[in-house]
Image (tube, rainbow, N blue to C red):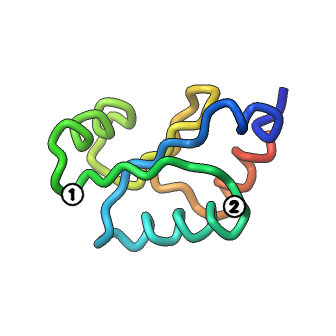
Amino acid sequence: MTYRDSMSEQPIVMYGAEWCGDCRRAKSWLTRNNVPFTYVDVENDDEARDKAIELSGRKNIPVLVLPNGDVLVEPTDTQLSAAISH
C-alpha cells in the first residue's frame, strides 16, 4: 500500500512553530500538494514539544509523523515528495 492509498485513513501529523521557516515551508508544500495533515504548534504547548522531541530524538522542527509511523525531521521538499510518494 502506498502513502496515497492510506492517506485518507490518517493524515500526517506535523509538529512545528510559526516562527520556524522550515515549518512554514513544509506546511506550504503539503498544502500545495493537497496532502492532508494535522498541525500541532509546539510554541506554547510543552506536552506537544516533548512529544516532538521524543519522536525525533532531538529538538529540531518540523517533525512530521507519517501514517505508517515513519518520522521526518526538517525534511526538504524533495524528501517530503519521496516519503509521500511511497
As drawn, the label of residue 73 is: none
The structure residue drawn at horizontal position 65% and vertical position 54%, both measured from the top left corner, is 80
Indicate the quadrant where residue 5 lies. Answer: top right
Q: Earlier in the sequence, mark 2 or mark 1?
A: 1
Q: Is residue 40 above or below residue 22?
A: above
| Secondary structure category for the residue under label 2 | helix
Tell me where residue 33 appears, x and y as whole percent: 73, 64
- Mark 1, Cα crowd under 10 Å, few <14 / some 14-19 / many 20+, is some
As drawn, the label of residue 78 is: 2
The residue most toward the front is: 8
| Secondary structure category for the residue under label 1 | loop
Label 2 – label 1 distance at C-alpha: 26 Å
Indicate the quadrant where residue 58 lies. Answer: top left
The structure residue drawn at horizontal position 56% and vertical position 49%, both measured from the top left corner, is 37
Q: Is residue 16 above or below residue 2?
A: below
- Mark 2, Cα crowd under 10 Å, few <14 / some 14-19 / many 20+, is few
The structure residue drawn at horizontal position 68% and vertical position 54%, both measured from the top left corner, is 35
As drawn, the label of residue 43 is: 1
Q: What residue type is disc 2 on?
A: Thr
Tell me where residue 65 appears, x and y as whole percent: 51, 38
Tell me where residue 6 appears, x and y as whole percent: 75, 31
Tell me where residue 49 appears, x and y as whole percent: 23, 43
Do the residues under discs 2 and 1 have CB atoms within 8 angstroms? no
